[in-house]
Amino acid sequence: MLSRTADNLYWLSRYVERADCLARILDVSQRLAYTPVTYGGSTNEWGSAVLTAGVSDLFTERYGPLEEAKEEQVVSFLAFEAENPSSIRNCFEVARTNARSVRTALTSEMWEVINTAWIELRNFPNRALTRDELSRFLAFVKETSLRFDGATFRTMLRNDAYWFSRCGAQLERSDNTARILDVKYHVLLPEKEHVGGPLDYFQWASILRSVSALTAFHWVYRDSVKPWLVADLLILNRQMPRSLAACYDNLARNLDDIASAYGRQGPSQRLARSMLARLTNRNIEDIFQTGLHEFISGFISDNNKLGAEIKEQYLT
Amino acid sequence: MRVRIRHEITQRFAPGSRNLSVTVRLTPRPHEGQFIQRWTLDLNSDGRLHPLEDAFGNLCHAFSVDGPTDHVTVVAEGEVETFDTTGIVRGTVEPFPPALYLRETSLAHPTEAVITFADSVKDASPDPLSRLHALMVHLHETVAEIEPTPTIMPMSAHDALVAKASCPGGLAHLFTAAARHLGSPARHISGYLAEDDEGTARHWAEAYVPEIGWVAFDPGRNLCTTENYVRLAVGLDAFGVAPMRSTGFECRESVCAQDGRVPTRAVQSQSQGQN
Amino acid sequence: MRQAFDEMSSTNGHVRPAYETLKQWLSTVPQDVLDHRRKEAEYIFRRIGITFAVYGEQNAQERLIPFDIVPRILTKDEWGRLSKGLEQRVKALNMYIRDVYSKREVLKAGVVPEDLVYKNPAFRPEMNGQRVPHDLYVHIAGIDIVRTDPDTFYVLEDNARTPSGVSYMLENREIMLRLFPELFSMHKVAPVENYADDLLATLRSLSPHGGHEPNVVILTPGIYNSAYYEHSFLADKLGVDLVEGRDLFVKDGIVFMRTTEGPKRVDVIYRRLDDDFLDPLAFRPDSVLGVPGLMSAYQAGNVTLTNAVGTGVADDKAVYSYMPEIIRFYLGEEPLLPNVPTWRCREADHLKYVLEHLPELVVKEVHGSGGYGMLVGPAADKAQIEKFREKLIADPGNFIAQPTLALSTCPTLVEQGIAPRHVDLRPFILSGSDKVRIVPGGLTRVAMKEGSLVVNSSQGGGTKDTWVLDA
């Protein structure tokens, strides 16, 4: 297939996934911001939302230091602002532009999800939303990504178009999970406060919520929320669809599918497999011992490197 | 005169560029006023030069560069024997009848100002050749010649007229636009001017005179071309004679055109526009 | 202006045979049902995204072309005459273009004035002496036809560059089949859906070299082009790649496309990109839509461009006025389809006549399209006419004039019910190395406003399904 088509499919999925993650970040920040400080709420929740979204430079340029970030500013910046290339609105815009350029490579179901979302986006006013409106908006975003994933899964042929699309989604997803961990890693470190205090509980719970894993946690560990278990779930647990290991499980498989269809392996297959091996062979104690923060920043940079390899090998 | 020429062009690209396509128009053809003794083209990259002839009979070469690279350099070098023909150009390859050279182009567009300018010599003489000479003199008196601005395309006919100063390429645009308006087919010429102490790349014009043929006018120097001129390419305007066309963002040239009978001097550098 | 010929009711109200069944059916279906079906059609169009962009409109970036659910009907005989005339016309166009870029006999014989070729911006010096595969230039032509009475079809305009609208022809039929299956059961309508197959066969036949299966692609300027929907629609129907300039590159005179499996050779490019933008090394240097080096590959004979470069030299309105002579010159035949009588304002006596009769005439720019830059005399007020007169006097060579034709009308669903509206017809003619293919019908465009003669979609015109009856 055309490299540009593959590139469009890959970015289409990445942007839909990114919109979804942003919606979750906003959701959780809102919740945490309303939680009294004594229960783990913090004063700069909104600042860390911007940090997690990876757009802090642009934000400070526009609104000043992160520590003073206000709710309205952050919501509008992450959700709607045209000047923020990664705002939810822009994610949907770019997704649709990509979808239009590859109409013929999409199923009509996938196109309709994207096109409908783009049309519906106009129904949300271009001013500050009420809390009610905002939660309806966030629900709409999350629903769109679910519908898109569903349409992709149910209607696309299992060929290179599908695999490139999935690679985009998985790469974006692992990046987002890693970013959440990167911003919040300090609350997972055992020495921070006495273990299991109410303050930490809300922080840990919020991390789990931001990847929709609070319920899953209890099913998997049948234990109360503990920081190393949260880290284990998000990094190493393959049952958890947003964990780094699960993402790489899929990435390595999709890249191998591409390689076997084309009859040729390349650097992206090798890198994905070596990252998967690293996530498989480690345990969480190990990671804490060598430094959680170092591990996560290393992962984010390797994840970017994989994106660059895929681009170099297939998309240009 | 035997003119020794060295013409080096470098076009820059974004670092890491790949699969570049380049066309060069850097090989002069002989005519009654010039004989090509030897001529070579050299590339800085591995690539095969594919010779081709453009619409106006110019010898071109197309080539591809795999990259990654951030520049492409071509060097043309050779010797040309020239003869004084009092500006009359005969024995050229002519794929088109003169009428084609009445076409308008964006660089040689007859704006109102250009038309007024041209009309002022309309009644200078009933004879086309004298009228063209009058046009050259009038142009020479109205618009001063200045050095070409590096890396920029020559001015349009209109801009040259309004600015009252232009590089030779802009003067040629104004001359061709005005001559065409007066009903004389006219065209844009690129080539080299060998002078006593320095040589340069240069643009001038040719106009068609019934019964005589093509006559070359250099309005910047107010004369018809002499044996110091080497004719490289012909086109409707400066775009048509561009020595290198590609998709890079900057083009630098260094040209040396000297009387081959005197010992070689240091290469003189200048930059000239294109793209 | 005399009363227009109505294709259903003629001029005297007698229903013409081809429309009898339709008329009867229309009289039995209540208006609200028709309205409902029309809305349904609109809904389907919007959902599948058949939209077009209108230049100069900021907000209405993607608009629907109004679709009229009442079909336009041609008989087998009418179509037979039309298709013969179209084939003749396109044959002459091809021979003319070939001549203009080689021996120029038509100029030497004085049939067409030199300056119409040499000073024509659409003439491409680069094509001079250039052999194109199979000597064909216009592989896909759209010839605009108007009708004034039962027997007279005029050619209004030749489109020899990148005629668009064929996706509407195909989608209109699909929608009609979905909405009105009962109507089709009452008529024998010749199918059009084989157009995609015909187009692919035509494109393949044009490959510059025999042997292996040619790789055909469609080259689009991109999603912001007003006809992008059509480009992607055709790529889908043909099962070929829809490429943009940046997907292609030229290496040593061969065109390749970038794929996920590495470079792949391209043999035939159905390009929906104007000449000017095709190759920044040969034409506009600022074009980012084209493919650097494409012309050198084309000149080396390693790739076919459809349509060929420089076909515009045959389809402006000044050349149009010479088409009858051009047909006689190359084919030694009388034109089967007449031209609309045309005054060339470049000629002094014609100009004089035109200036004296402006309120009766339609005056058009030689290089204009889309219904812009024209004067419809009978519909214009005094001030508009005087303003146009100045433009005309300033640059007469830029205009032609034609009588205001009483274009035929067809029954059309409007707010007040079924009413006659003016129509034209654009059939699509495919010329391959093996044969000429024309699917029966074409795109009928309809002026939705009462009395309006402007059918262009950019000015509020709509479309209809066009039926050629098979018996």
Image: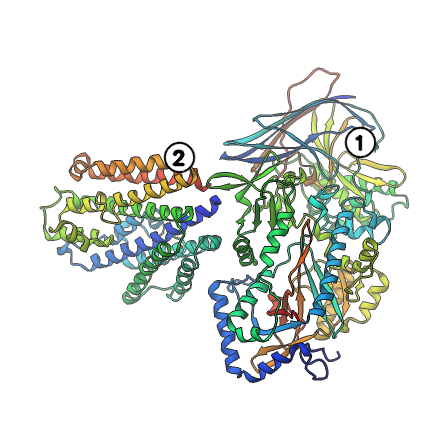
Q: On the picture, is A178 further left or further right than B158?
A: left
Q: Is residue A285 above or below residue C4?
A: above
Which of the labelled discs sits on residue B225, or is there none?
1
Which residue position is annotated with label 2? A266
Q: On the picture, is C338 further left or further right than C69?
A: right
Q: What residue type is disc 2 on?
A: Gly
The residue mark sitting in front, 1 or 2, is 2
Give the chain letter at badge 1: B
Q: Is residue C469 above or below residue A147?
A: below
Which of the labelled discs sits on residue C357, or is there none?
none
Measure the alpha-carbon separation of dots 1 and 2: 61 Å
Asked if residue C11 shows in the view, the reply is: yes
Q: How many other residues sit within 10 Å of disc 1, few (<14), some (14-19) or many (≥20)? A: many
Provide the secondary structure element on which disc 1 rests: loop
In the rendered image, residue A150, in percent from the top left (x then y), is placed at: 34, 57
Q: What residue type is disc 1 on?
A: Thr
Q: How many other residues sit within 10 Å of disc 2, few (<14), some (14-19) or many (≥20)? A: some
Give the chain letter at badge 2: A
Residue shown at 82% from the left, 42% from the top: B97
In the rendered image, residue A17, in percent from the top left (x then y), is placed at: 34, 52
Single out the residue that lies furthest toward the front. Answer: C471
Q: Nearer the viewer, residue C14 or C435?
A: C435
